[in-house]
Structure formats: C-alpha cells, structure tokens
Image: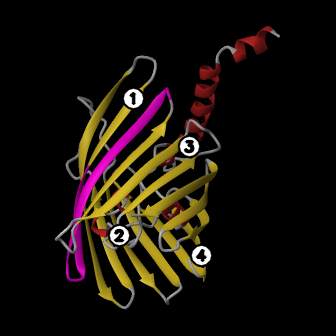
Amino acid sequence: MVEHQYIRNFPTGIKALILLSVLLAAGSAGSAVPAVRGQGTLGARALALGQATAAMAGDNWAVFHNPALLKTEQHAVSFYAMRFAGLAELTDMAAAATFGLPGSPGGVVGAGLHRYGFDLFSETRFRIGYRNSLDRFSYGALVNYSHVSLGGGYGSAGAAGIDLGVAAEPGGGLVIGARAVNINRPAYGDTDEELPRELAIGVTYRMSGSAVVLADLVKDVRFPLSLRCGFELLLFPDLYARTGITLEPGTWSLGFGYSPESFSVGIAVQNHDVLGLNPGLDFSVSL
C-alpha cells in the first residue's frame, strides 16, 4: 500500500520513466533515433505516403516540406496532430497557412507552427516562407525558428535556420523537387547542438487521373541515406487511399483522405519498427 501511494504521488516521475524507456529502445535501433523527436514532415497525407514530400505538389503542409511547392490555387488553413506509441507526452501538434499575394500570380506566402513534447521537454518551431515560379520551374525559401525547453530548471534555447527548395514540372504528370534544410548550420544558443541538416530529392509521377507514385532520397548529415516511397489512389470522387514505406528508419503506413472543394480531412497510421503504431489526423479549410 505504501508503495502504491508513493507511485500515485509521483506521476511526473512515472512519465519520465516511460519516456526514458521509449528513448532507450529507439536508441538501440541506431538510425531510429530521429523518430523520437518532433516530426520534420507533417500532415496526414505525408505520413500515409511514407513521408515522401520533396516533390509532393498540391499539399497544404508544403511549408514544412518544400517551400517551392506552396499551394497557389487558394488560401488555406490546416491543423494536424500525431501521437507516438500511444503516449500523450510524445505528441506532434501543428498548424499551417498559405496565402496568395495580390498582384503576383506565382507569389505565395506560407507559415507554420509546430509543437512537440510535454513539460519535461518540448520543441516549438515557427516557419515562414515564400514561393514564386517561372513557367514550369518554381523556387522558394523560408526561415525556421526552433526553440527547445527542458523542465526542472534546465533552461531553454533557440536557433534560426534557412531552408531552400526548388521544383520543376516538365510535363507528362511528372514533378521533380529538392530541398536543403538549415543550410546556415544553426545551433541552439551557445552550444554545439545543431539543428538537423538535410538534403532531399524526390519525384512524383501521376500515372493516370486516379493514381500517383512518389519517391524520395533523403540524407540527414547525421544518419544513413533514407528511401521513402508512397502510392495514392483515388477510390471514389474526393476519396483517396494512401500507403507508403521508409527505409532508415523502417516504417510502413497507410491512410485515407477526403477532399471536396472547400475542405479536406486526412487520417493516417504509421507503424515504426521501434515505436509501433502512430496515428495522425489533419483538417484543412480553403478560404
């Protein structure tokens, strides 16, 4: 009885113990370590398609993936949540918005806000970017401010990074895209802890009016080359089925999306080799 009362009086300690177990398990998998951090790619569509986002055109979350692919068709606001391993403390929550610039046919501004973690550790990111285009070629850049906070009086620190993106649509349903993340090598505060730096190149091929294939090669400077692939199929008007895989770390995923003209809803589940099933949900409104 005394032991049970002790446990009830220390919920934060139990949370920390559970999270430490998850982190140690992920650490034993080597390249799986990045998965216990906040996601770099966001949105249920991206999650379901194996996070193959370097050339993912027409997505409301491009401000987190490739600024050269910010949507130009209409203004939109989006919201997203994902939970790792069923733990509320390992939850990603994000919002994104895109707005076309008056008088600039190809000019688009995008903004995003992302938070991950709980009271003992949290990571918050704010992004703002710009996209423009020349014929079938588009380009974009964004500034990303990341802030981490450690509970228990250990303090906090922030850093600002710069991302660049390019994309081309040569025709025939093909899109080629590339991004470079944190090219200025930012580090938190006065430490040597750098923000993740990444290079990615990808292709999207629309096989027909109802099927899309995506593939990325992604290289984080700290980890092995990662292959990411996805497949999207239009089942019925406005209803999509999606699936994807990644290597390094190993995941598979599936999901569905419903996208009529004025809004869209997406659900996805990712199975991680270490963390198990991780569900995600997003909702977007066109303005």
Residue 149 - label: 1
Image height of 153 relative to 68, above or below: above
Q: Disc 3 marks which residue?
A: 26
Neighbor class of circle 2 (other Cα within 10 Å; few <14, some 14-19, many 20+) is: few
- Marks 4 and 3: which is nearer the front? 4
Mark closer to the chain start, 1 or 3: 3
In the picture, measured across the screen, residue 108 lies left or right of residue 213, that is left
Residue at position x 41%, y 17% from top?
A: 153
In the picture, measured across the screen, residue 232 lies left or right of residue 66, that is right
Mark 1 and mark 3 residues within 8 Å of each other at the beta carbon = no
Task: Determine which quarter of the picture holds residue 281.
Answer: bottom right
- Marks 2 and 1: which is nearer the front? 2
In the picture, measured across the screen, residue 96 lies left or right of residue 266, that is left
Mark closer to the chain start, 2 or 1: 2
- The amino acid type of the residue labelled 4 equals Leu
User: From mark 1 to mark 3, how far is it between C-alphas?
Assistant: 21 Å
The spot of residue 82 in percent (x, y) is 55, 50
User: From mark 2 to mark 4, how far is it between C-alphas?
Assistant: 20 Å
Quadrant assignment for the N terminus: top right
Neighbor class of circle 1 (other Cα within 10 Å; few <14, some 14-19, many 20+) is: some
The spot of residue 43 in percent (x, y) is 48, 58
Neighbor class of circle 4 (other Cα within 10 Å; few <14, some 14-19, many 20+) is: some
Q: Disc 4 marks which residue?
A: 239
Residue at position x 61%, y 47% from top?
A: 275
Residue at position x 37%, y 72% from top?
A: 55
Q: Which residues are magenta?
A: 119-143
Neighbor class of circle 3 (other Cα within 10 Å; few <14, some 14-19, many 20+) is: many
- The amino acid type of the residue labelled 3 equals Ala
Task: Determine which quarter of the picture holds residue 69.
Answer: bottom left
Magenta span: helix, strand or loop, mainly?
Answer: strand
Q: Disc 2 marks which residue?
A: 74
Q: Secondary structure at mark 4?
A: strand
